[in-house]
Amino acid sequence: MNIETALKEAMAVEGAIGAALVDYDSGMSLGSLGGGPELDLEVAAAGSTEVVRAEVRTLESLAIDDSVEDILITLNRQYSLIRVLGRGHGRLFLYLALNRERANLALARHHLRRIEAELSV
């Protein structure tokens, strides 16, 4: 699955507002879909990059031999789900913003895991 297809699949998740594939070394989005006046995906991608970097640094500082799988940020009306992609994908993550009233987090996590498995970058 290419980036465009992966983002379309992410946007098919119930309650999806916006999705992006982000390089967390540079903070740059490799592609995005959705968003709008209430969600600037470029800003969300850059901010989420800082969250991912902080968590990775924390694991390294604690000498925890593990890796980040998902990071969830809950807002009053929105969820931000960050799926850090495995080693075969470089230093990338999928960012998915969800409408909190319509989203099912378990299903969203499942969909992102499937997208990761099929993504070819």
Image (cartoon, rainbow, N blue to C red):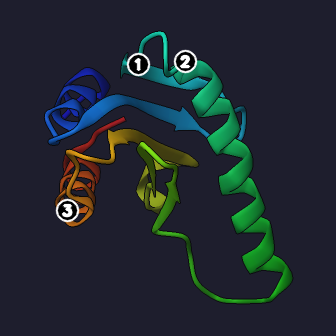
Compared across the picture, whether 22 is left or right of 51 comes to left
Task: Indicate which disc, 3 or 2, sits on the residue closer to the N terminus.
Answer: 2
Q: Which residue is denoted by mark 1 in the rendering?
A: 35
Q: Which residue is denoted by mark 3 in the rendering?
A: 110
- Residue depicted at x 37% and y 31%: 19
Q: How far apart are marks 2 and 1 (CA)?
A: 6 Å
- Residue depicted at x 71% and y 66%: 56
Classed neighbour count for the residue bearing mark 3: other residues with Cα under 10 Å, few (<14), some (14–19), many (≥20): few
Residue 58 in the image: above or below residue 89: below
Looking at numbered disc 3 in the image, what kind of residue is underneath it? His
Looking at numbered disc 2 in the image, what kind of residue is underneath it? Asp
| Horizontal and vertical percent position of residue 33 | 34, 19
| Horizontal and vertical percent position of residue 116 | 29, 51
- Which quadrant of the rendered structure holds the N terminus? top left
- Residue depicted at x 48% and y 60%: 72
Compared across the picture, whether 107 is left or right of 120 comes to left
- Residue depicted at x 73% and y 55%: 53
Q: How far apart are marks 3 and 1 (CA)?
A: 21 Å
Q: What element carries label 3?
A: helix
Q: Which residue is denoted by mark 2 in the rendering?
A: 40
The answer to the question of whether label 2 and label 1 lie on touching residues, with beta carbons closer than 8 A, is: yes
Looking at numbered disc 1 in the image, what kind of residue is underneath it? Gly
Q: What element carries label 1?
A: loop
Classed neighbour count for the residue bearing mark 1: other residues with Cα under 10 Å, few (<14), some (14–19), many (≥20): some
| Horizontal and vertical percent position of residue 77 | 42, 43
Task: Indicate which disc, 2 or 1, sits on the residue closer to the N terminus.
Answer: 1
